[in-house]
Every structure is written in C-alpha cells, then in structure tokens.
Image (spheres, helix red, strand yellow):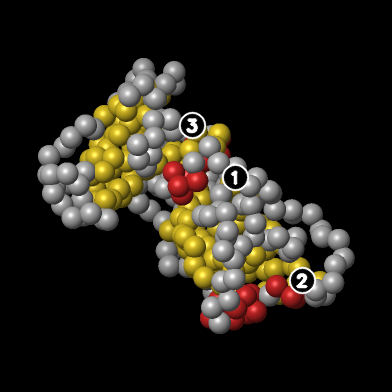
Amino acid sequence: FMGSESFLLEVSQVSSNKGAVVHNGFWKDKGMGKITILGGQTVRVRFQFFDKETRAPKRIPKFAFAFYDLGQHDEPMTLNRQQRDRAVTLTFADSSGFEANLGNTGQKANSKSYRAVLFAPKATLDCTGTQEPISTTTLSTTKPATKPGGAETTTKKSNDCMHVESKGRAADNVADLEKMILEEKYVKTAVIRETFYFTSKPTDLCTAFADTSGSKHKVCIGAWAGCKAKMVWKTSGGLQFHNKEFGGEDAHVALPTSETTLIVGTFESETGGFYDGEHMKLILQGYKSATSQ
C-alpha cells in the first residue's frame, strides 16, 4: 500500500513474472513505488485506490499517474531529456484504478537482467523541472492571421465509425504530408501512447487540437471497440488536446523529441477492461525533417 491523506493505493500482480522478486516496494524516500522485471519478461499489474478509513474501493474524480526509468538518476522531479523520453504520465477521470503491462524486453533473462520501473500517482511530465531546456510552446487555438501558403479550407472525412474535420490552410493537407513521408522527406523519431477517458457515456469519443499553422482539427470515433481514425499534422513544442467539451479532460502531451515536427496519429476506441467506461487510445508517431541534424 502507498497512501495519502485521502486514499490508499494497492499494487498487486495480475500475471506472473518469472524469476525471483527483488527490491519491490517503496523507493527510497521519494514517495514512489518500484517494480523490478526480469529481462525478456512482462508483468501485468493492478493499481487500485481504497478509502483510507473504510478500505472500500475509492473512485477519484481526476488523477495523474506516472511511470519512469531513471537509470542512475536519484531525483524524479528533475529529469533530463533522455529520462523524459523514458517516462509517461497517464491521466484518468472518475476511476478507482487501472491495470498496466510492464515489460523489460531489451535484455535476455539472467540473474543480472532485472530492470526497475518506478511509479507514483503524480503528473511527472507536466510538473517537473528539467536539467536540459525543454520547449514549452503551446499550439494556438485562435484563428491565424492571413498568410501566404494556401487558402482557408474546410475538409471532412467520415464513415460509419469516425468523423474528422479540419479547418485551415490547404498547403498543409493530410495527403501532401503523407506523400512527403512516403518520399522519405520525413523520418521517424519516437512513439507516444496516450489514453483519454470520458466521464459520461457518449455515442462518440471526440478530441480537438490545432497544428502549428493554427489549423483546427476535430476527431470523433464511435464509442465501440474497433473504431479508429488516422490524422497527420505539423506541430512544435507540444500537443494540446481539448476534451472538456466532449466529457473528458484537456491534456498536454510533450513531443517525443525536440526535433519532432510532424505527427501521424491513430485514434482508436476501447471499451471494458479494468476501467469501466469508454476511452480513446492514441498512438502518436513522431517524425522529423530528413535534412535536420
């Protein structure tokens, strides 16, 4: 159990992890937990909140949960670029817990191949300081000033499972950006995975965001398993997703690397599981210009 003034956090293993369990539990005096995983193995872990007095499951209106691999670094609140790239912060709404698969797939199993995953119910990536400068530019959601490079257009794409609407400059349309990727004018950087939860029971799961030119995009997918949509857009500094008007929570997502200027995003609907409700899973593949150093 880990605790605060209002809840206890119980961490339990759902699936088995080969090999001996070593050094699991609290990590130093940082208010964090640690789980060690044998090389080449994965383990499924359940994180659940309980009322501190009654020990009954406790639903929390909104919370963030962070996982990270600090290597030899001892201070989770000051992360350098590499440590930030190895960390992830998940945000949840109206939930009493969740399950996660944790893995150590980069090494072969032996007595020295254990890897530690640290965790804490806090928004590490949104709130920490850094040891290296990190861009904090926020994407504009206001109408951009008139600039050369394409007329204002509105494009829509729909089927039984999804609806995508973009308002902005024709110069940055999805087909052109996809063509530049195929022509290898952009190369991959890294992948970000995020999940958006919704407190209501919507027919569609929606999110909205803007790109660097100020073009606005809205993505809606049917709230049943298997529905998905794909988008390509330019970005810089970070991704600001607006979800409140659709029954979720707004989210800021840091770019996978400072060189990332293009995102290929897959938005997919998921239901059921440990979290009782519909949620939108995002897989965001970053790209950079092939000519950048």
Picture coordinates of residue 247, whole percent (x, y): 59, 48
Quadrant into which the N terminus falls: top left
Q: Say whether residue 93 is left or right of residue 151.
A: left
Look at discs 1 and 2 and give the one toward the viewer. Answer: 1
Residue visible at 54% across and 37% down in the picture:
130
Amino acid type assigned to the residue bearing label 1 in the image: Ile
> Mark 3 vs mark 2: which is more N-terminal?
3
Q: Label 1, on which residue?
A: 134
The residue under label 2 is 169
Visible in this render: residue 73?
yes
Under tag 3, what secondary structure? loop
The one nearer the camera, 293 or 17, is 293
Crowdedness near tag 3: few (<14), some (14–19) or many (≥20) residues, C-alpha within 10 Å: some
Q: Amino acid at mark 3?
A: Met
Front-lying residue, 79 or 22 = 79
Of marks 3 and 2, the one in the foreground: 3
Q: For the residues marked 1 and 3, what is the alpha-carbon distance in whole angstroms? A: 14 Å
Please name the residue that numbered disc 3 is placed on: 77
Residue at the spot 53% in from the left edge and 63% down from the top edge? 286
Nearest to viewer (mark 1 / mark 3): 1
Secondary structure beneath dot 1 equals loop
- Which residue, as the protein is rendered here, is positioned at the far right? 146
